[in-house]
Image: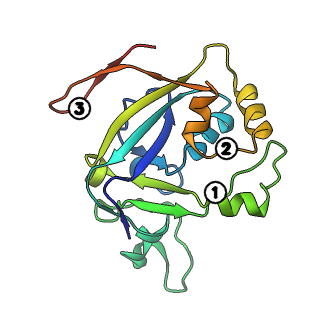
Amino acid sequence: MNIPQGTILFRCSPDATNIKPRECSDTGKFGTYFGDRAIISLAMCLEYNKLMQLGVYRVTEDIYVSNDKYAFREINPERYYDINGNFIIGVNPTKEENISHIKSNLILLSQSGKLLSDQKQRELNGSEIFITNKHIHKIKRISIYVFDKDFTPLKLLNYMIQNDYPFDINTYKKDKILKRIPCLFNYFHDKFAICFP
């Protein structure tokens, strides 16, 4: 399937100017994770108990992705499964197998570890998207947001609960949870940015 040109993606990280691919501990593939909804990336701040920058990005050309996190194992299945179909542990992906993927229908948890309501999960209909070296040049940074210096992960969680887990970044902007920071970009290659909080 394709991630269409113009798609907006989100990513929380300590430095939103850096989207350099890293190793995924689950798969051994190298790439960068994004969310297609702001809340998917903001949830990482709760998971790590650390407020990070939220980067907003645009897909500049269609990107072909597999429709499963582990679909790369079907390219050369004999490398990953023995003759009885048992999974072989410790096999690292080859360059050919290092493919971008999408994982849809993510399930976000409430503060108590219980699932969000079925209705809220259906509304979310969110995806995490893993982009490899082959496609990372098709991702352009649009803007970077930060939290107020007095904000905390607990305050973020309480805000989400009190506001029924808003999905859209505009809600967080409107309520002054996130503020955009100005950046000076290298307009020729967009390789670096200097941002001023």
Q: Residue at x 49, y 57 (%)?
A: 27
Task: Please tell me which of labels 3 and 2 falls first in the chain.
Answer: 2
Q: Which residue is mark 2?
A: 166
Q: Residue at x 77, y 63 (%)?
A: 118
Residue 100 in the image, given as x and y percentages of width and height: 38, 59
Element assignment for label 1: helix
Q: Is residue 20 left or right of residue 48?
A: left
Identity of the residue drawn at 34% across and 21% down: 183
Disc 3 to disc 2, how far (Cα)? 31 Å
Nearer to the camera, 122 or 189:
122
Q: Is residue 28 visible?
A: no
Residue 116 drawn at (x, y percent): 77, 54
Q: Which residue is outermost to the front?
A: 174
Q: Residues within 10 Å of mark 3 (few under 14, many from 20)?
A: few
In screen coordinates, is 143 left or right of 125? left
The location of residue 4, given as percent across then percent down, is: 34, 61
Circle 3 residue: 190
Image coords of residue 170 (percent x, y): 55, 37
Confirm or deny contact between disc 2 and disc 1 (CB under 8 A): no
Q: Which mark is residue 124?
A: 1
Q: Amino acid at mark 3?
A: Asp
173 vs 155, nearest the viewer: 173
CA gap, disc 2 and disc 1: 9 Å
Q: Nearer the viewer, residue 137 or 167?
A: 167
Give the label, 1 or 3, closer to the camera.
1
Q: Which secondary structure, mark 2?
A: loop
What is the quadrant of residue 148 in the picture? top right
Disc 1 residue type? Leu
Whether residue 125 appears in this view of the structure is: yes
Residue 132, labelled with which disc? Answer: none
| Vertical position of residue 165 compared to residue 96: above or below | above
Circle 3: element type:
loop
